[in-house]
Image: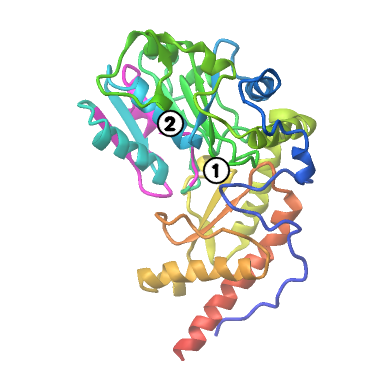
Amino acid sequence: MTRTLSKPDLRPANPHFSSGPCAKRPGWDLSALSDASLGRSHRAKDPKAKLVRVIEESRDILGIPDDYRIAIVPASDTGAVEMALWSLLGPRGVDVLAWESFGSGWVTDIVKQLNLADVRVLEAPYGQLVDLSQTEPERDCVFTWNGTTSGVRVADGDWIADDRTGLTVCDATSAVFAMDLPWRKLDVVTWSWQKVLGGEAQHGMLVLSPRAVERLESYAPPWPLPKIFRLTKGGKLNEEIFTGSTINTPSMLCVEDQLDALAWARRVGGLPALIARSEENYQVLADWVAASDWAEFLAEEPANRSCTSVCLKIVDRWFRDLPEAERAATSKAVASLLEAEGVAYDINAYRDAPPGLRIWAGATIERENVAALTPWLDWAYTTVKSLSLAAVR
């Protein structure tokens, strides 16, 4: 007989635990956008100055080296990664690392779309990390720093050689502003506004090291490049793209929102404070998991567990004995029940991941809201389980 828990009294003040788009910063409201340069050309002096501010504020808060170029690009993190893959890959062999859905997507692009001849795919199942020692410094390397759909991240950049001759291409969209990235180890870094700082969608960020710029200026891909992928002009880097002149038209409303998020990041203490906030949120969940009799981390190795996209698997024997389709339906029912209660939105596991829950714990989440959520997780799971058992009897 499964015990049904009483409904908790305390609810999270903010139920937004989605892994993307993520929660807005604490205290955000529409008045934060009141100074947006609406109805203006993004190439005019004042609007362009705001685009430059996004670039330079991002550089300063994240500690990006002065000789790295930064651009605002179209199509979110996906667009930024695609620009890098289609513009830079080809002259060397490529190691592609995949341990979750988005990394697998880059495998598909490189193997089936670019159809490169010398590709090594290093894959690991959900919950595990590939053997990073298998990468070779003379080959290009494409990887996600933080697996948003698996909750598995790389712990550090020690596995990347300082004297590498290949380029490292890092999809860091759920890692920046929450983890300390070793910028000199990374040649291409991408992210999107709607992740860790809770910005709005469709805009991506692309960071290039001097070595990546050298590749762009010395190598011309054999395939045609769409206009929104073109980073060079006349065989040289198009510097305008990296000084606020975007390839296509950005939303100045979203730009204003990103400036607000960056200003908040600075107010709370910059990158160290953002990292601390995320790790504190993760620790609340870690403490709850340690005491849980039905939930565990999907990520098997503690050092590789994400502090932003916290992915949980259900290990209760009753759940494990269910047919696969029923397991997926059960985790979805738990998430749907929490949403119906207004307690947590969008926390079902990613569609390609094993059944379970995925809870965003990035810096814009308040620790007390995570703490308020945990008893609701127990309530929702025991309620769904009790109802399922009652239906069988």
Give the residue at x 56% y 81%: 2
Helix, strand, or loop for circle 1? loop
Helix, strand, or loop for circle 2? helix
Q: Residues within 10 Å of mark 1 (few under 14, many from 20)?
A: many
385 or 102, nearer to the observer: 102
93 or 243, nearer to the observer: 243
What residue is shown with label 1?
Answer: 306
The spot of residue 225 in percent (x, y) is 33, 24
What residue is shown with label 2?
Answer: 81
Q: CA distance from mark 2 to mark 1?
A: 21 Å
- Say if the magenta span includes residue 141: yes
The spot of residue 54 in percent (x, y) is 65, 25
**Within the image, what quadrant is residue 217 found in?**
top left
Q: Amino acid at mark 1?
A: Ser
The spot of residue 248 in percent (x, y) is 51, 28
Name the residue at the left extreme. Answer: 117
Colouring mode (rainbow / by chain / secondary structure / one colour):
rainbow
**Within the image, what quadrant is residue 180 found in?**
top right
- Quarter that holds the N terminus: bottom right
Q: Which residues are magenta?
A: 119-148
